[in-house]
Image: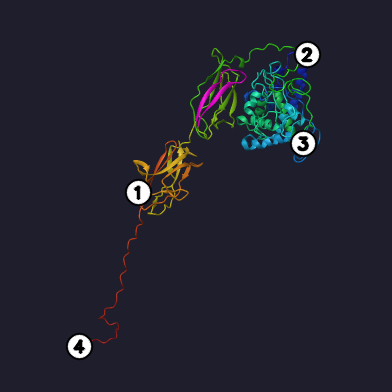
Amino acid sequence: MAAQFGRRLYKGAATTAAAALAVAALSASQAPGVTVDGHGRTTAADAQPSPEATTSGDGGATGNSPYYTDLPPLNSPSPAPTAGTPVAQGSAEAGIPATVLDAYKKAEASLRAAKPGCNLPWQLLAAIGKVESGQARGGRVDANGTTLSPILGPQLDGNGFALIQDTDNGLYDGNSSYDQAVGPMQFIPSTWAWAGRDGNGDGVKDPNNVYDAALAAGHYLCRNGWDLSLQSDLHSAILSYNHSQDYLNMVLSWLEYYRKGTHEIPDGTGTVPSGRSDGHAGPSTTPPSTPPGTGSPSPTPPKSDEPSTPPSQSPTPTDTVDHLADAGTAKLTAMAGDTFAKKISTKAETKAGKAVGKVRVRFTITGDTDATFTGGERVATVSTDKTGVAVAPALHAGEQTGGFTVRATVVGRSVPGLDYTATVTERAADTLARTSDTALTCTPGGEFADQVEVKATWKGAVADRVAATAILIKSADDATVNDKGPYFKDAAGKTVRTLTGLRTDANGLLKLPKLYADDTTGTFLLRVTTEGGATLTVELTVAAATSPSPSTSPSPSTSPSPSTSADPTASASPSA
């Protein structure tokens, strides 16, 4: 939705441009944190987007189509309950239709669970919905949240707007020649193709459904790892939706207004704004003149003060791109759960091999994989730098192993894509060690008092969720399963000497089940191995209990000699 008037309007529309600029100045004056001097110039530094904000995104979810420029009412809205039958309080212009408001709040709840670090407020969705479509044309939606008639922006044929040739065969916009922004959140078909979501659980991703569109807008605003509680990230996200400072100011004005509280109104009773960013009066979104899929809607006729043909334009950087080339991307391999150490680098070049800067390159993850870019998205768009190179965000491997493809394409230009193959391997460990040095002993037919616990590491770091196997082997040189000695028990209590399907926990620890001993004595070996080659051999000893040594009996007490009289008074025997 374009708000950069020099790009959007014909050069002859001086009066329209002047009026639009006046609205933009007023919009800027009401943006939060923005001050205006006596000449109407914006003076707050934070009203300007950061360099990061102006280069992020894929050029706009809406293809920079027109948007509404009506400002919020000066009076704060009056909050109202969100349950039961909505009753209008205050002006209908300030209220939000019940179904539309419900869609925004459900999208916020979904994003709070899926991407808690984004901190998406539903009021931001409401602000964008207000500016994009006047809250789905005042809440003219059915019970499922689908608009009663299609909401379409003008065809993006380069005639006063961006040039975006058809990307969906007219599936969403009914136009098989050029793309048009679609639905209450005004997604262009090429963006909806990857950003679309099913917000009402009916199995369909419909840009004309306010639940689907609100959830898609939420995910769109939460990509790139943005935290919308930070002003810089908030500005970046809004500018990525429509790359215009005036658009940013307008959305921030409505965001601030809705944050102060708002009220529900019945569906279909909201008013549709009248001001448009391209200077036209009336609705900025109109239904197609032909049924979807049957051809192109009739373009909006130019105003009387506009030329009948667009002025000649110099080729854009995108127009000069002939092909994409790899810019030194290394082999893409990572273990499950890890971030790929290398990033994908792609270079845009002319036919002569000259680098092309300021070109948007879209990276799309394809194939059966749960790998994502940083932020949890499967699609990322990056502009090339002055050397023509675009570097994709870091890839994060999921738990699914195997190969997948990342395809790089030029946004707005039909040139062959460039494919990169990436591989996710099993989690691995290179070292195993016991967590205790206690000797493991048992008597025949008994059970070992201590359970074997090991810790796995990979290059010194904890190796979590690594697959492992434990086998009671015959000897250090013979790793076949022993048929005697210590053993484990399965769930049915039967003897087993091989355990598979084991996995270390989040701390890299693995505690084996209890060990038991049969009647065979001796020294036995337990071998634990993991994916990645880590091996640990543990000694188990089965020996009969040692009998205690007999103790020395105490000496009996000395008894008086039988010949000795115990009576000292006894008389001596008479002499012979």
Determine whether the residue tagged by mark 1 lies in a helix, strand or loop: strand
Nearer-N-terminus badge (1/2) = 2
Q: Is residue 418 magenta?
A: yes
Q: Is residue 312 left or right of residue 457?
A: right
Looking at the picture, tell me which residue is in the foreground, 526 or 30: 526
Nearer-N-terminus badge (4/1) = 1
Residues under labels 4 and 3: Cα distance?
140 Å
Q: Which residue is mark 2?
A: 305
Kind of residue sitting beneath label 1: Thr
Nearer-N-terminus badge (4/2) = 2
Colour mapping: rainbow
Determine whether the residue tagged by mark 2 lies in a helix, strand or loop: loop
Residues under labels 3 and 2: Cα distance?
41 Å
Looking at the picture, tell me which residue is in the foreground, 340 or 416: 416
- The answer to whether residue 317 is seen in the rendering is no
> Is label 3 in contact with label 1 (beta carbons under 8 Å)?
no
Labels 1, 2: front one: 1
Q: Which residue is mark 3?
A: 264
Q: Which residue is the extreme one toward the right?
A: 90
Number of dots carrying numbers: 4
Q: Position of residue 448 (x, y in %)?
A: 42, 52
User: Which quadrant, please, contains the N terminus?
Assistant: top right
Residues under labels 3 and 1: Cα distance?
78 Å
Q: Residues within 10 Å of mark 3 (few under 14, many from 20)?
A: many
Bounds of the magenta segment = 402-423
User: Which quadrant, please, contains the C terminus?
Assistant: bottom left
Q: Which mark is residue 575?
A: 4
